[in-house]
Image (spheres, rainbow, N blue to C red):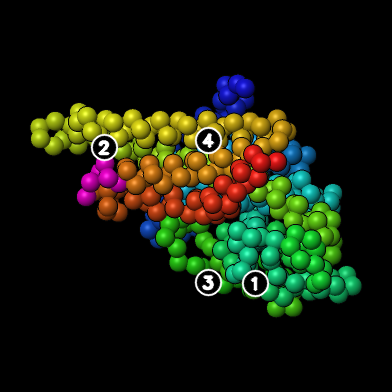
Amino acid sequence: MDFTLNEEQELFLEMVRKFTRNEVAAAAEGVDREHRFPRETIAKMGELGLLGLTIPEEYGGSGGDYLSYVLMIEELAKVCASTAVIVAVHTGLACTSIACFGTEAQREKYLAPLAAGEIIGAYALTEPNAGSDAASLTLMASDEGEYWRLNGNKVFITNASEAGLFITFVRTDPASRGAEGITCLIVERDTPGMTVSRPVEKMGLNGSVTCELHFDNALVPKENVLGDVGQGFKVAMQLLDGGRIAIAAQGLGIAEGALEYALRYIRQREQFGRPIAANQGIQWMVADLATEVDAARLLVYRAAWLKTMGKPHGKEAAMAKKFATDTAMRVTSDCVQLLGGYGYTREYPVERYMRDAKVTQIYEGTNQVQQMVIARHLLR
């Protein structure tokens, strides 16, 4: 296993780093403070071909490999975790779902606008009573000839305020239970009967706008079925294996960004006549943090490499997601501590990193669910 990047990946990473330093970092504080969706940043990413990284070139995308995608999410999260998760949902879930499971007509219709950022994608799986247990979803889709009639609700939908289409999971067989009878649909924003609620107030990721979706006799054409009728749960799980790696990369980036800032701070901050970095207790602390971050990076890159190679990666994705996001929470909390009272204020970014880190332990499957996934693989 060789994690050395090839020339194309190196050039891509250099371009992404330049973009995040010059564009994303400058907007991060305002995006958080104003709870503002970073429209200008996302538009520029579309112009650069970053939003279509997982889309084949023949459909208007960049045709990049999965490791490059993970590197992009990591770099974005180093400076703005909100932007990272917006892109992860748009590119990693919405674009990828249509690229992998869409018909030729669906690919022709949606992928080029998604790649350009003309349409923002969202992923609608979670419901009020179907979070970690996604198979218990109850959004019903009844057969109406050429349409499916949708009634029910979705919650915690990232990008919902801006999205032009929603990858939506519904129950098309009213007699089914669990994973059976679930179908995936492409639901366009202007669908009559679908409404998007006001944004949910959250602890962090304030630039990533999260809303509820309400369906009241919403009619969706049957040509918008993604994959096969009744096979939607398989679509969801295949996408989420990759999605977990992206959230692991987000956690990794958050931890790296916070630690890099704290290291700069402790070199400059003086107490008792010398930089606090000269204190052994501080040195031990940052040594442990750096070790955890490096371990997280190896787990994330291993999972991304396995997916890029087309190898099984379910267990490795769950390991990476759990460890990297737990690491993000520990590292950011300790970085606040390293800055002392200043770390607790909004004058410094480490408190934002800590607030943004928490949800990475929750979405794309809680870390307790990741433990269940890991154990299931081990005990087969």
Seen from this angle, which residue lies furthest right? Answer: 145
Callout 1, which amino acid? Asn
Q: Which residues are magenta?
A: 336-341
Q: Are marks 3 and 1 in contact (CB under 8 Å)?
A: no
Answer few, some or many: residues within 10 Å of disc 1's Cα (few below 14, many 20 plus, some between 14 and 19). Answer: many
The reply to whether callout 4 and callout 2 are in contact (CB within 8 Å) is no
268 on left or right of 331: left
Q: Which residue is mark 4?
A: 16
Answer whether residue 342 is visible to the viewer in this image.
Answer: yes
Q: Nearer the viewer, residue 295 or 169?
A: 295
Q: Earlier in the sequence, mark 3 or mark 2?
A: 3
Q: On the image, numbered disc 3 is attached to which residue?
A: 198
Mark 2 lies on residue: 265
Q: Position of residue 275 (x, y in %)?
A: 18, 32
Disc 1 target residue? 153
Q: Residue 256, which numbered label? A: none
Residue at horizontal 44 percent and vertical 49 percent from the top: 357
